[in-house]
Image (cartoon, rainbow, N blue to C red):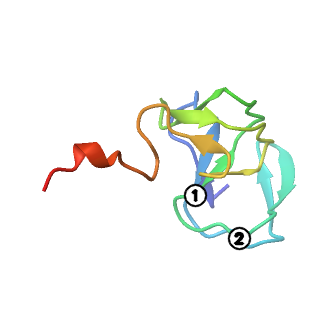
Amino acid sequence: MDKLFKINPDDNVYVVRQSILEGERLVIDGQTLTAKKTLGLGHKVAARDIFKGSQVIKFGIPIGSATEDIRFGDHVHLHNLKSDYIPTYTLDHEFIKP
């Protein structure tokens, strides 16, 4: 698993440390997985099934919640993950003062 790593045993995602190409076969925890898409450095891959509403854990801390069921080996990103702490890509204009 030279292309993926996780720091904390409680993590439910791996982090990509070398690009993975669509169609590439990887062995993760003894299971063979075929990459559904090309993923670059820093992206996340589910280390196990993560069910809708469950926390996503990276580096031993929760980074958000799954917005849908995420299967082992799936790409974990903004399409299936939301922050539990701050809006992900918008700010309330009331907080911005000239």
Secondary structure state at the residue bearing disc 1:
loop
Rendered position, 17 above or below 45: below
Secondary structure state at the residue bearing disc 2:
loop
Considering depth in this image, is 52 or 50 the residue closer to the camera?
Answer: 52
Mark 2 crowdedness (10 Å alpha carbons): few <14, some 14-19, many ≥20: few
The residue sitting at 62% across, 54% down in the picture is 4
Tell me if 1 is positioned left or right of 72 in this view: left
Tell me if 93 is positioned left or right of 79 in this view: left
Query: How many labels sit on residues?
Result: 2
Q: Are marks 2 and 1 in contact (CB under 8 Å)?
A: no
Tell me if 12 is positioned left or right of 95 in this view: right
x, y percent for residue 44: 61, 51
Tell me if 88 is positioned left or right of 19 in this view: left
- Viewport quadrant of the C terminus: bottom left
Residue bearing mark 2: 38
Residue bearing mark 1: 43
The residue sitting at 67% across, 27% down in the picture is 53
Q: Give the Cα distance between marks 2 and 1.
A: 10 Å
Rendered position, 47 above or below 35: above
Rendered position, 31 above or below 53: below
The amino acid at mark 1 is: His
The residue sitting at 41% across, 38% down in the picture is 86
The amino acid at mark 2 is: Thr
x, y percent for residue 14: 62, 46
Considering depth in this image, is 74 or 86 the residue closer to the camera?
Answer: 86
The residue sitting at 73% across, 31% down in the picture is 52
x, y percent for residue 66: 66, 36
Location of residue 65 by image quarter: top right
- Viewport quadrant of the N terminus: bottom right
